[in-house]
Amino acid sequence: QVQLVESGGGLVQAGGSLRLSCAASGRTFNGCTMAWFRQAPGKEREFVAFIRWSSGSTSYADSVKGRFTISRDNAKNTVYLQMNSLKPEDTAVYYCAATPGSFYLNQARKYEYWGQGTQVTVSS
């Protein structure tokens, strides 16, 4: 049974930093893509970043490019999202997701596995 468990959310002032973690278990993730999505109240879930587990190649939403960094630790089966220069508009529940698929990786509907989410709140 695949499990994705997020941690690291919290309350931070604008301009601050947080690092989210996603511990993955239940299958081999080689060949999978891991991603972070976020959902603010009253808004649709939106793509933040993904990383291909095998190659380490990454992609980011324009809104976070240059501020967020996605990475993975193969030995720990964990994916991270380092968030710097946080803005109030980054406030959302952040979800970790995984898919064995290879296309449309910025679309939530393409992901089979999801974590429970972790709240990130950025105060102005």
Image (spheres, helix red, strand yellow):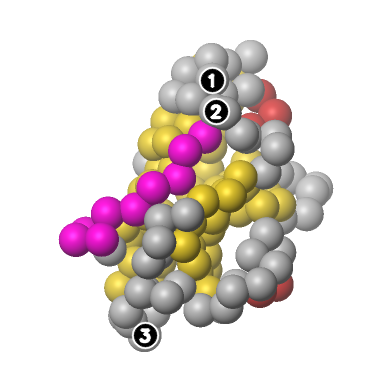
Please tell me which of labels 2 and 1 falls first in the chain.
Answer: 2
Q: Which residue is mark 3?
A: 1
Per the image, is 75 magenta? yes
Position in image of residue 83 (x %, y %) = 48, 32
| Image position of 51 with respect to 112: above or below | above
Bounds of the magenta segment? 68-76
Q: Which residue is mark 1?
A: 85
Q: What secondary structure prevails in the magenta region?
A: strand
Marks 2 and 3: CB-CB under 8 Å?
no
Q: Which residue does the image show at 46% across and 62% down from the upper left?
A: 52
Looking at the picture, which amino acid does disc 1 mark? Ser
Camera-near label (2 vs 3) is 2
- CA gap between label 1 and label 3 equals 36 Å
| Image position of 69 with respect to 104: above or below | above
Sort mark 2 into few (<14), some (14-19) or many (20+) by Cα contacts within 10 Å.
some
Q: Which residue is mark 2?
A: 67
Looking at the picture, which amino acid does disc 2 mark? Arg
Camera-near label (2 vs 1) is 2
Q: Is residue 11 left or right of residue 2?
A: right
The front one of 74 and 98 is: 74
